Every structure is written in structure tokens, then in C-alpha cells.
Image (tube, rainbow, N blue to C red):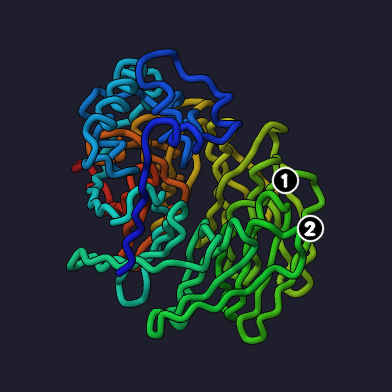
Amino acid sequence: MFIFARSFVTGAALIALVPAAAQAQQLPEGAGKQTVEAVCTACHNTSLITRSSGYSLDHWRELTATMVDLSGDTALRDEITGYLAANFPPHDKLAPTLIPGPAKVTFKEWVTPTLGQRTRDPIQAADGTIWWAGQFANLIGRLDPVTGEMTEYPLPDGAYPHSVTLDAAGNVWYTGNKNGTVGKFDPKTEKITVYKMPDPAARDPHTAIFDSAGILWFTLQHSNMIGRLDPRTGAVKLVKVDTPKARPYGIKIDATGTPWASCNGSNCLIKIDPATMALTEIKLPIPETTVRRLEIASDGMIWYVNSSQGRLGRYNPKTGEIKEWPSPSGKASHPYAIAVVDGIVWYNESRRRPDALVRFDPRTESFQSWAIPSGGVHAGIIRHMRATREGNLLIHQSSTNRIIEVGLSRPVPATQ
């Protein structure tokens, strides 16, 4: 088992850790400000603090304990959490609008071992185990949901995996988001095979998925590209998206084997010809739209989250019809991850605290939603969700290193 540890120093050496850009984002004045800037911005921007829902002293302690181990220096811990509690107390400005309804769900949580890893993108293997990416800690992990046992595996330097997916043989593939690679991890031998991008402009492999022929398709968000990797030959082919800064993000395969991608920087969906890699962009009605992720239902409908407008959308590739519905928490709710299970659409509102899990029934066009647990704090976010073979959902809370299985049940029809 691989356990990643971070060490921190105090005093003037701490301040040297602060990136110039992070220092420029001012926190309120107060005792402990410089120390908070130094410790927190060693890993993330201060905007994650200022955009939070605020916490009590005990909850700030709980949240920071998921990121760094300060148990050996209680004075440092108290300085940091005391400043945070004084300047960022709880508020309800980000509270979601939760919709009641007849459906029932259950949440089962696991906390991954390495602090501050930003656990994300869990996926179920054929044997029932769950794999995830620990992006900030440069690892992938394996969870046995029956025993709770977890094992973490370090990746080559600089990979910082954005996501993981599985091939038919059970190998775990990760996207090296920081070093322009895609990697294959063999769980039997623990051997890692690295595939480098053939173009230096292809910097950030993002999300990946296999088609039925065993070809890996993936997006490269900031590089504005779509990629295809043939594991049999190792050949990688890349194509550029026509719209500048379209930022292809999520990717799925339809029943015909055609990949579709979402645009996180423009109002488009992208259809990819699997033979030629020719791209066809479908423009969505609201020009300001951006789409984090999409999902393809069994009837061929393409569901997407209109993240910038706080809406859920559906595109019919046969007729070209596009329809959208406002999400319960409004325009600023930023829907993010999405999955369709048994005809029901599930997604999350990522800019609410707590992160809300939303259920949408296309037959009745009705919503229902729940607050997603994350220990005692509300610090999401779900960035990807996928169904299990049993018809449940795998989600995560990246800020608190949690993998969550959502047990789904159908509502009981009312008696006549």
C-alpha cells in the first residue's frame, strides 16, 4: 500500500511556499492570515476558502484534517482554524433548493487514506472493486467495498491523473492531466505503461472512455483537442476542435460506437466520426452555455448539464430537438456530473453547499433532490458520476476525499 504524506514547516519558510498568484488574492486581515495563506495555497487557491459556505471551529478542524495532518502541531492547527472560523463562519447563501419527492436513496461513504488527494471519478470493476484517481497526490486507488480495504498506487512523476477508466481486461487507464500522457496500470503485475502525446500542444488529457472495439477515446480540455489511442499498437491520433476555446470535457459513446463530447468553454456538443475523427459541432440554443458533462440514455437521447446557466438539457440526435429545464437551485447552481440509470437522470448542483444530488424523471418532468453527505462539512464536489452494474451510483466528494455509493430505489406508486 502506498501512503503519501505531506510535511509542512512554520514561520518564514511557510511564506516562501506561497505562489505569487495565490498571494495576490487577498484574505481578510487578522491573526493567522499569513499562515493560512502559506499552508492552504501550497495546494490550492484561496478562492476555495472565500467561496465556501463557512464553518464552525470544529468543522474547520474537520475539513482541514482531510487535507493536512496538523495533529503534531496543535498551535499551528489552532492558529489556522481559529482564523478561518473567525473570518469565514457558517452562512446559508449557498444553500440548495431541495425538492421533496417519493424516491428514496441511501449514501455509503468511504474516506480514502492519503490526505489532500482530491479523490475523484470512482468506477466499478468487473469484480466489484472500485478504482479512483487521487489527482493532487498523483495516485490511483483500489477499494474493496465489502471489506473496506483500500490500496493506493503511485504514478509516474508529474502525471496528476484527472480520471480513470477500465478496459475489458480489467486494466486501469488514467489520464495524465499535467504531463500530457495516458497510462495503463495492470492490477496483476502493478506495471504501468505510459503513452505520450505525439504533439507537445496536447498537454492535458482529461476524461477517457473505451468503445466496444477496445479503442480509448479521450478529451484534452485546455488543448482543445479530442484524442484516440489504440492499445494494440500504441498509436495516438489527435484532432483539434474548430471552435477556439471550446474546451472538450466529458466524453461518452453511443450505441452505434460514435463518441460524443461536451464543451466546457462554448455552447456545443461534439459528435466524433469513429473512422475519420471528423468533428461535427451541435450548437446549443443559449450562446452563454457551457457544458461540463453529458450522458447517453438507452433510447439514444443525449442528456447534458448546462453548467453556466444552471439547466439540464436533452438533445435528440435523430430529430435535432433540444429541450432544457431549469435546475431547482437556479442559474448559479452549476450542474456538473451526470448519469442516467433506468431512464432516470441524475446530476449534481456543484456550487451549492451542501452539494445537491438531483433526480429528474423525463416521463413526468419532475425533480427531486438530496443534500450529499461529506462527513460533518459541506465541501463537495462531485466532478463525475457513473452507474454500477447493480443500478446504483458511484459519486465522490473531492474536497473531503470521499467515495460514495448512492443506493437507488424506485418510488412506490400511490394506491388508487
Q: Which residue position holds label 1?
A: 246
Q: Going 55% across and 67% down the picture, which residue do you hit?
A: 209
Q: Is residue 148 above or below residue 46?
A: below
Q: In the rendering, at what x and y percent does residue 133 appear? A: 43, 59
Locate residue 14 relative to residue 307 in the image: left or right: left
Q: Is residue 363 visible?
A: no
Q: Is residue 206 visible?
A: yes
Q: Amino acid at mark 2?
A: Lys
Q: Going 36% across and 21% down the picture, which residue do you hit?
A: 32
Q: How many marks?
A: 2
Residue that protrudes farthest toward the front in the picture: 12
Q: Answer few, some or many: residues within 10 Å of disc 1's Cα (few below 14, many 20 plus, some between 14 and 19).
A: many
Q: Nearer the viewer, residue 216 or 194?
A: 194
Q: Quadrant of the N terminus?
A: bottom left
Q: Identify the disc placed on residue 240.
A: 2
Q: Amino acid at mark 1?
A: Ala
Locate residue 157 relative to residue 363 in the image: left or right: right
Locate residue 364 relative to residue 98 in the image: left or right: right
Q: Circle 1 sits in a helix, a strand or a loop, which is it?
A: loop
Q: In the rendering, at what x and y percent does residue 47 appear? A: 50, 28
Q: Going 56% across and 63% down the picture, which residue do you hit?
A: 175
Mark 2 and mark 1 lie on one chain; the one further toward the N terminus is 2
Whole-Å distance between the Cαs marked 2 and 1? 10 Å
Q: In the rendering, at what x and y percent does residue 283 appear? A: 74, 44
Locate residue 129 relative to residue 122 in the image: left or right: left
Residue that protrudes farthest toward the top in the picture: 29
Q: Nearer the viewer, residue 18 or 87?
A: 18
